[in-house]
Image (cartoon, rainbow, N blue to C red):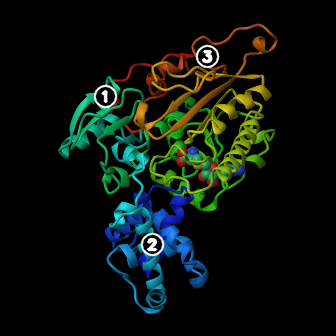
């Protein structure tokens, strides 16, 4: 029984995007991790099939089981190796077994297949997901890139150096890895490489984060000592990345509305050694931008809830097209409200807006609408070398996708406050994407590869510097 309750709990959390399956399973402290992991993965894989069976047989109505609990039980009863529980649950499930079996058989007849696995849609997204490289962000609050590389080499990994082309991130296998060509502190491993049980991950020295999701903090690039706000922060991967870029110096306000995700964030930030944060389990839209507390906030990262349509591991939406359209409209309206709200912080000079969505409605359309309503801000042209751009005319922004950037689908825009002269009609755009902030800040965003070197030497004298990095240019 404990197995099914835990598996259902993890599926609930995955749906609420509280973390990846593996992370949640490993953090669950369940006795038999392997058994739990296998059940969650299988139930997830067969999710659409199980859901159809459960709905067609009205199992939830008859048993009062919640959907994910019903899914894991039905999976083991019909497809897995039989129920691993006794007592009243077994009696209940056995009572419904023939109806459930009949529905499964009916589905196979309808699809003209004989095996259970043939009921699975050969979704291209799942296949793509399996082929994506695995990215590891080195947490420079606890260690250095060089130290992690050395540690892994001692464990038998082969380090192939700095990648120079996208192909270098693809054509390797086994225990080999490279440094990413776009983002510093990012190591790239072959697909399916798993570090969840690794010491470096457990100790917070490495963060398992998709490359695209490292873009927002990297492009915001706040200097040490800055006041920064992460508006929709949980579970906190980008927050810890910001803290690392700030060398834990300054103030990092992080908000999240969801209590569970907020609590996960507190744990993750602790593990990552973040100390400059001020967390609040609060609705960002209710945060008063005029409050003196936030008067020094110059940088905002806004990564609001989105459809998640870029996440290749998420199942295809089962909703009707009209329902989906309504959902996207509501999400886009929420995203625009958040964006407009963020631009009201009086000291703001630079903001990153990002989503893990591939829908124009949540990306370019939100940014365009926002810029129309806030003429005091403009887009910063980002990373000319990045292979995928925002859809025209918003080509200053970046997009990411499995096919082009070997990442999940993603969108990033950087907005900066226009200089006063420009607002008055004198056109003096920043040619190189340099922000109009008072504090020292990285120049052209394309140079951001060098940006992490701008702050002071690491506090920990045992840390080594990454010799590959060059000194960053700053401007005041
Ligand atoms: C895409 S996730 C953020 C992921 C996070 N930036 C990271 O990298 O780990 C969106 C988050 O926004 C939170 N959220 C949604 N509405 C919110 C609101 N009105 N105020 C604050 N947080 C909100 C959700 O709870 C969710 O945790």
Query: Which residue is depicted at the point 57% across and 41% down?
Result: 357
Q: Earlier in the sequence, mark 1 or mark 2?
A: 2
Kindly state the secondary structure of the residue where label 1 is placed. helix
Q: Nearer the viewer, mark 1 or mark 2?
A: 2
Residue 420 position (above or below residue 341): above
Query: Which residue is depicted at the point 56% across and 47% down?
Result: 308
Query: Which residue is depicted at the point 59% across and 17% down?
Result: 433
CB of mark 3 within 8 Å of CB of mark 2? Answer: no
| Other residues around mark 2 within 10 Å, as few (<14) / some (14–19) / many (≥20) | few
| Other residues around mark 3 within 10 Å, as few (<14) / some (14–19) / many (≥20) | few
Residue 278 seen from this side: no
Query: Which residue is depicted at the point 74% across and 33% down?
Result: 343
Q: Earlier in the sequence, mark 3 or mark 2?
A: 2
CB of mark 1 within 8 Å of CB of mark 2? Answer: no
Q: Mark 2 = which residue?
A: 106
Q: Earlier in the sequence, mark 1 or mark 3?
A: 1
Q: Position of residue 103 (x, y in %)?
A: 47, 75
Q: CA distance from mark 1 to mark 2?
A: 45 Å
Picture disc at residue 476: 3
Residue 327 vs residue 108: left or right? right
Q: Nearer the viewer, mark 1 or mark 3?
A: 1
Q: Position of residue 76 (x, y in %)?
A: 38, 76
Kindly state the secondary structure of the residue where label 3 is placed. loop
Q: Position of residue 227 (x, y in %)?
A: 64, 35
Quadrant where the N terminus sits is bottom left
Q: Position of residue 30 (x, y in %)?
A: 39, 72
Residue 398 vs residue 466: left or right? right
Picture disc at residue 167: 1
Residue 7 seen from this side: yes
């Amino acid at each position: 029984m404990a197995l099914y309750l835990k598996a259902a709990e993890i599926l609930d959390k995955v749906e609420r995007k509280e973390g990846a399956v593996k992370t949640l399973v490993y953090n669950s402290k369940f006795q038999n991790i392997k058994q739990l992991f296998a059940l969650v993965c299988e139930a997830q894989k067969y999710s659409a099939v199980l859901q159809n069976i459960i709905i067609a047989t009205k199992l939830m109505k008859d048993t009062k089981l919640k959907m994910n609990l019903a899914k894991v039980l039905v999976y083991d009863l019909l497809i897995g190796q039989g129920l691993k529980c006794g007592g009243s649950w077994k009696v209940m499930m056995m009572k419904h077994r023939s109806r459930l079996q009949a529905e499964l058989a009916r589905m196979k007849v309808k699809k003209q297949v004989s095996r259970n696995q043939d009921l699975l849609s050969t979704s291209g997204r799942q296949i793509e997901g399996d082929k994506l490289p695995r990215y590891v962000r080195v947490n420079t609050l606890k260690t250095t890139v060089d130290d992690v590389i050395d540690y892994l080499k001692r464990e038998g990994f082969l380090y192939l150096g700095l990648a120079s082309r996208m192909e270098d991130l693809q054509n390797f296998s086994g225990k080999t890895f490279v440094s990413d060509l776009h983002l510093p502190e990012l190591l790239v491993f072959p697909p399916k490489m798993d570090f969840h049980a690794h010491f470096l991950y457990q100790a917070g020295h490495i963060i398992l984060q998709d490359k695209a999701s490292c873009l927002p903090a990297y492009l915001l690039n706040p200097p040490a000592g800055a006041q920064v706000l992460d508006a929709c922060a949980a579970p906190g991967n980008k927050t810890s990345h910001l803290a690392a870029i700030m060398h834990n110096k300054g103030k990092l306000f992080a908000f999240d509305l969801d209590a569970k995700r907020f609590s996960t964030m507190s744990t993750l930030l602790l593990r990552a050694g973040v100390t400059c944060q001020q967390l609040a389990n609060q609705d960002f839209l209710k945060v008063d931008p005029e409050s003196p507390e936030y008067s020094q906030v110059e940088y905002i990262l806004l990564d609001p809830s989105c459809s998640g349509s870029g996440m290749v591991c998420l199942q295809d939406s089962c909703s009707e097209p009209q329902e989906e359209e309504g959902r996207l409209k509501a999400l886009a309206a929420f995203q625009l409200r958040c964006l407009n709200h963020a631009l009201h912080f009086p000291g703001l000079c630079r903001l990153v807006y990002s989503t893990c969505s591939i829908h124009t409605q949540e990306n370019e359309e939100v940014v365009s609408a926002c810029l129309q309503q806030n003429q005091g801000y403009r887009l910063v042209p980002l990373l000319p070398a990045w292979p995928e751009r925002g859809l025209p005319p918003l080509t200053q922004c970046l997009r990411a996708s499995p096919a082009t950037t070997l990442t999940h689908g993603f969108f990033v825009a950087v907005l900066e406050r226009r200089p006063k002269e420009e607002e008055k009609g004198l056109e003096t755009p920043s040619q190189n994407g340099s922000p109009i902030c008072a504090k020292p800040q990285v120049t052209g965003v394309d140079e951001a590869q060098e940006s992490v070197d701008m702050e002071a030497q690491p506090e920990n004298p045992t840390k080594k510097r990454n010799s590959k990095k060059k000194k960053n240019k700053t401007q005041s």
